[in-house]
Image: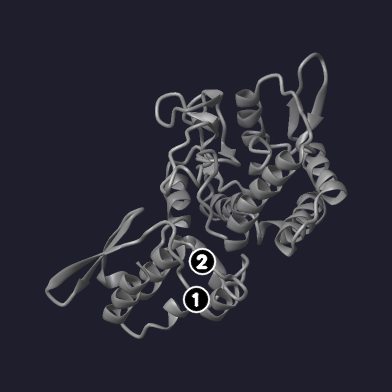
Amino acid sequence: MFVVRQVLVGAGKVGAESGGAAIYQLSQRADFFAEPANAETLYRRPIFNTRDEPHGDPSRWIRLHVICGDANMIPAATARKVGLVKLALHLSEAGTAPVWRMKDPVRAFQAISRDDGCTYRVELEGRNWTTAAEIFESYFAAAEATLDMDDEMRWVVETSRRLLRDQTEDFDRFRREVDWAAKRHVLEQVLTEEGTDWRDPSLRSYDLEYHNVDPEESLHAALVQMGEVAPNPDEADLRASLEGVDEPTRAFARGLAVRRFGSQLETAAWRTLTLRVGDRREEVELPPDATYPPELADTPDVESFIQALRGIA
C-alpha cells in the first residue's frame, strides 16, 4: 500500500534529486528511499519503518512510525492517506491482506512517482507485473469481503475508487482532491503563460509556495478561494468531526492550541505546550493517556485553555 498510495495522496514535486531525470513527480519523498524496511529514519530511509518508540506507556502502546508519506494541503487527501493505512492495518490484523511480492519496492516507488504516462506498472518477482490500480482494488475487495468496515473505511474505499476512475475520465474533478494533480495543473498554466518549460528554476518556487501555511501567501489557499481545489473544513466541520469521539488524543489539544492561540504558542512538543500569557511563559503537560474532551474547544481565552489542560492532567 505504501508504494502505490502516492497515486492518490502524493503532494507533487518539480524535478528530481536522485536517480533518473524527471520533470515532475507524484511524490516528494520517492527520491530519498534506500531500502524496503529497517529502523533507520535519516541515512538509509526505508519505505516501511520498523522503529518502535512509543510516546506513551510502552506496556500499553506501540508506535507505527510512518515516514514515507508526503505533506498534504488538501484535507481530504490527508484523511485518505491515513485511511488507506488504517485499512491495510485492519486487513493485516485479520490475516486477509493481499500479498504482492514486488521485485524491487524502492525502485517501484520511484518509478510510479516518475510515471508521466500514469500507467503505474509494478514489476513483481519472476517475470510478472501488475499495476497500482490492481493493487488498490485487491485491498478494497478484501476489505469489503472480510472486514466489518466503519463509515471512515467505507469512505476511503468509495472515494479512492472514484478518484482512480476520475484520473482517466474526469481529470478536472481528480485534481480538485489530489495535491499532486492540483499543483501540476497550476504549474502547467505557468508554463503556458510564461512561455517557458520544465527546466525553468522558478517552478520550484511555485512548488514551495503551494505548501506555504500563511493563507496570505499560500498558493494552495489561493486555489481554495478560486474554487479550484476542494475547500478546507471550517470550524463547524471540525467540531462536528468530534461528535461521538469519547477520548480525543493530545493531538486534539495541540491542534486547538495552534488554531485558537497560535500567536501565543511558543512551542508544541510531544509532552508539553508552552504558551505566552502576558509577560510570562506557561508550560503545560500533555499526558499521553489523558482524555481531552471536545469541551476544550469552548475555552474563551488562553488562560482558560491552560487551566482546563492542567485540570485534565
Determine which residue is flagged by label 2.
248
Q: Is residue 164 visible?
A: yes
Q: Is residue 257 above or below residue 105?
A: below
Could you tell me how far apart the alpha carbons at marks 1 and 2 are, in whole angstroms?
Answer: 7 Å
Type of the residue with mark 1: Pro
Q: Position of residue 57 (x, y in %)?
A: 43, 47
All told, the count of numbered labels is 2
Q: Is residue 61 above or below residue 228?
A: above
* Element carrying mark 1: helix
Determine which residue is flagged by label 1.
294
Q: Which residue is found at the position 71% from the left and 48% from the top?
A: 87
Asked if residue 145 lies left or right of residue 66, the reply is right
Q: Position of residue 278 (x, y in %)?
A: 15, 77
Asked if residue 165 lies left or right of residue 219, the reply is right
> Which quarter of the rendered picture does the C terminus lie within?
bottom left
Type of the residue with mark 2: Pro
Callout 2 crowding tier (Cα within 10 Å): few <14, some 14–19, many ≥20: some
Residue most extreme to the front: 59
Q: Which residue is found at the position 61% from the left and 56% from the top?
A: 77
